[in-house]
Image (cartoon, grey):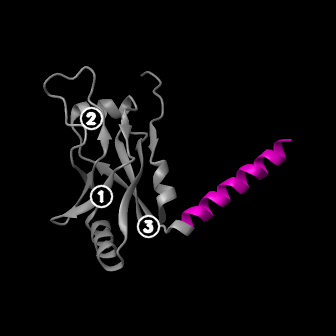
Amino acid sequence: MALQQKINIKNRRASFEYEFIDKFVTGLVLLGTEIKSIRLGKAGLSDAYCYFMKGELYVKNLHIAEYAYGTHYNHETRRERKLLLNKKELHKLERKTKESGLTIIPTRLFINDRGLAKLEIALAKGKKLHDKRETLKKKDAKREMDRMRKV
């Protein structure tokens, strides 16, 4: 078997916009051309979000590019995809989003060691403007400290 590269697509903007409270790893219901595109690293999480519909969790705006060698069976790039969680986790997430006004954000898309596509989602609370400024200050301070250590 050929050595394959690790696929790890992150939503970098999410950590800046939201404060993560809890994280979950979910499976996705995908079509054949979608998994092939993900294995090539052709996916983006920047505008994606999760929502509940009839007690099931879906991800919307998850961009998976069309597979280059796909025929008329190719998939829509931004279609809604069902997420796979057990009932206990689904009920917990649904209760938290309804009660506290929290949101569910996809943070990372990866291929696990069994070759399956997994999506890491986070229960998150939106940051205010001053929180975002504080995050930037911490990042700058850390970068400055790392520079000082190298010299």
Secondary structure beneath label 2: helix
The residue under the point 25% across, 42% down is 78
* Residue 88 can be seen in this image: yes
Q: Identify the residue under disc 3.
A: 126
Residue 132 falls left or right of residue 139: left
Nearer the observer, disc 1 or disc 2? 1
Structural distance between the alpha carbons of marks 2 and 3: 30 Å
Report the label total. Answer: 3
Which portion, as a residue range, is magenta?
131-151
Q: In the figure, 67 relative to 17: above or below? A: above
Question: Camera-side residue: 135 or 73?
Answer: 135
Residue 50 has which mark? 1
Residue 109 falls left or right of residue 86: right
Instruction: Bin the neighbour count of mark 3 within 10 Å (Cα to Cα): few under 14, some 14-19, many 20 and up.
Output: some
Instruction: Bin the neighbour count of mark 1 within 10 Å (Cα to Cα): few under 14, some 14-19, many 20 and up.
Output: many
Q: Position of residue 42 (x, y in %)?
A: 37, 32
Magenta-colored stretch includes residue 140: yes
Q: In the figure, 61 relative to 65: above or below? A: below
